[in-house]
Structures are given as C-alpha cells and as structure tokens.
Image: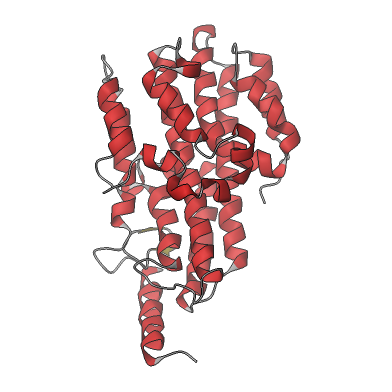
C-alpha cells in the first residue's frame, strides 16, 4: 500500500505533467511540441552549449585545438560533466547500454578513442586535415548525444524495474532520467544537439516528432509511477532511426562532394557511426563490415553507395 506521502507526491507529479503537456508553467520546465519536463533538467540541457563551445573553438580562420581539447576534457556549462567523461565509459555502464557497439569496437570507451584522436590528431587522424578532424568531431559529438539518450533510457528503466524499491523521485529517479533524454537531445532552445542536426536532414523532423511523442507517452505512465515498455521501445526506435538517418545523409553527400572533399565526407560519416554502429550491430550485424569499409581507408564513392544501400530496410526496433 502506498503511503500518504507517496500518494501526494504522485498527485503533485500528475498535476505538473498535465500542465506541462499544454505549455511550460514553471521557470525550470523545458519542452517542445507535446512534451515538457516534469523534473528540473536545466543543467543537463546546457550540455549542448559545451558542444557549441567546442565547435566555436574550431571555427574561424584559426582553430584553437588546445581550447577545444580542454573543453572536451573538463566541460564548462554542464557542471561536473564533459564530452570526454561520458565518452570514456561513463559510470562504467556503457557496455550495458551500448552492448553492440562495445562488442564491435572492442571497448566501451570507443567514443573517447575516436573523438580524442580527432582532437589530438593521433591514430586514424594523424595525417588528416583540420577540416576532416573538425567534421569527425562535429558529427561524433552529435552521435554521442544519441548514445547519452540511450544511457538515460537504460537508467530510467533500471530505476523503475530493477531497484528495490523502485526509485520514482523527481530528483534522481526514473522520471528524472527520462527527462534527461529530452534535455540532451533537444539542447539549449533546440540548438547544438541531435534535435537541430536532425531538423536539417530529410526525414529528420519526423524522427524528432516521434521521439517527443514517445517521451510524452512514457511520462504519462511515469506520473502514475508505472514503467511503460511500449513507450520505451518507441524511444529506443526513434534513437535508432536518428542514428541511421544521420549516417545515411552523411554517406549520400559523397555523391555530390568534390573529390577534394571526399575525405571530409568520410570523416563526418565516421563520426555518426559512433551511434549507428549500435543500431546496426544490434539489428543487422551482417552489414557492419560494409559500413566499416566505407568509413575507413581511402574515401571511395562506390563504397559510400554500398554502405547507403546496406542501411535500407534495417528495422529500427
């Protein structure tokens, strides 16, 4: 039987969400379309500004790579967090929430290996141009946002279904992690994160809308302190669809890119591979090699087309 305090908390949570689905009423609420947060995730939403600051450091006539590396390592706007901290097997749980990609790359810190090498000009980027390195970082950080959404989805489910008792707290429980998916994906005022990247490509807006609808659906159950497997599957499918759409768009750019821009095109696709590899590794592992061939070695238009064709028809859940 629920305690009086628990019942009152649930009732308050219900009233907040019913208001938030219409429009944000509180200064701490964030939202877009049908979804508005029921927990305060403003700090998490500022992670997108860290991504913007890294990109800004690398723009203009002279890129400031040391400044970008410092921002990557230590962060700035999202307190006590950074791109590098998440990329390097965040909380030791990325092998749990990104199992297919971890298996494919051989390490749960595969995102850090890729992004750091682009920042430092080491490994696969030791002889790459600054334009290639910037493109890899730009796309790779967007992919990381999708993977952070996967992490928060897993944490939300863990706190609802695998903790005894379940943690429904708005401060650190399942609903908070659910809201963090939106905070990371949307970015500050819809900018600098996965939401903005998707809005710029064909079909991306529809994927964003699917995700927002799924988040709203799941939150309605969370209000009643219930887990919604159906909504969780829809969120996961939306993140899968986003990863494939961004990779497909990057590969397609190889058709029209000048010869001297093919390496940049390949580097961008390789960045998006950080998220799409989890999707393909889980749902169509036989296609992993085809994509790896396209994003590795000497850029080749035929390999880009083969990889694009391999992405067609992959189920998203």
User: Can residue 197 be seen?
Assistant: no
Indicate left or right for 93 with 287 as reference: left
User: Is 109 in front, or is 195?
Assistant: 109
In the foreground, 143 or 257: 143
Q: Report the number of numbered marks.
A: 0
State the residue lying farthest toward the right: 286
Q: Nearer the viewer, residue 32 or 98?
A: 98
Where in the figure is residue 57, as x and y percent of width and height?
A: 27, 26
Q: Is residue 212 above or below residue 160?
A: above
State the image coordinates of residue 59 (x, y, percent, origin top left).
Answer: 30, 22
* Left or right position of 208 against 291: left
**Is residue 108 shown to the viewer in this render?**
yes
Q: Nearer the viewer, residue 25 or 180?
A: 180
Residue 241 lies, with reference to residue 261, above or below; the image says below
User: At 28% from the left edge and 47% from the top edge, which residue is drawn?
Assistant: 78
Which color scheme did the rendering employ for the protein? Answer: secondary structure
* Side of 114 relative to 296 (left or right): left
Up the image or down, 201 lies above or below 156; here it is above
Return the x and y of residue 241 as percentages of the image width and height.
60, 45
User: Image point 46% across, 25% down: which residue?
Assistant: 136
Question: What is the x, y in percent for residue 113?
Answer: 47, 29
């Amino acid at each position: 039987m629920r305690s009086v305090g628990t019942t009152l908390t649930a009732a308050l949570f219900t009233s907040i969400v019913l208001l938030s689905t219409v429009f944000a009423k509180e200064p701490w609420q964030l939202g877009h379309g049908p979804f508005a947060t029921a927990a305060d995730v403003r700090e998490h939403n500022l992670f997108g500004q860290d991504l913007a600051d890294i990109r800004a450091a690398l723009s203009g006539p002279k890129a400031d790579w040391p400044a970008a590396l410092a921002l990557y390592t230590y962060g700035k706007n999202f307190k006590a967090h950074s791109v590098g901290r998440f990329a390097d097997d965040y909380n030791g749980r990325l092998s749990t929430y990104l199992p297919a990609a971890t298996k494919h790359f051989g390490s749960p810190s595969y995102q850090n290996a890729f992004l750091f090498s682009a920042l430092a000009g080491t490994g696969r980027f030791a002889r790459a141009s600054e334009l290639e390195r910037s493109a890899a970082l730009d796309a790779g950080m967007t992919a990381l946002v999708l993977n952070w959404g996967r992490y928060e989805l897993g944490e939300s489910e863990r706190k609802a279904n695998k903790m005894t008792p379940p943690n429904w707290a708005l401060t650190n429980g399942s609903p908070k992690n659910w809201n963090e998916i939106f905070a990371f994906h949307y970015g500050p005022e819809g900018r600098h994160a996965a939401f903005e990247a998707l809005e710029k490509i064909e079909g991306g807006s529809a994927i964003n809308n699917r995700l927002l609808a799924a988040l709203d659906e799941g939150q309605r159950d969370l209000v009643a302190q219930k887990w919604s497997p159906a909504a969780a599957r829809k969120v996961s499918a939306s993140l899968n669809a986003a990863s494939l759409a961004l990779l497909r768009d990057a590969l397609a750019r190889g058709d029209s890119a000048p010869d001297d821009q093919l390496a940049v095109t390949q580097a961008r696709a390789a960045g998006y591979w950080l998220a799409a590899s989890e999707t393909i590794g889980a749902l169509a592992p036989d296609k992993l090699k085809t994509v790896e061939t396209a994003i590795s070695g000497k850029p080749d238009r035929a390999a880009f087309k083969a990889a694009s064709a391999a992405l067609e028809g992959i189920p998203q859940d």
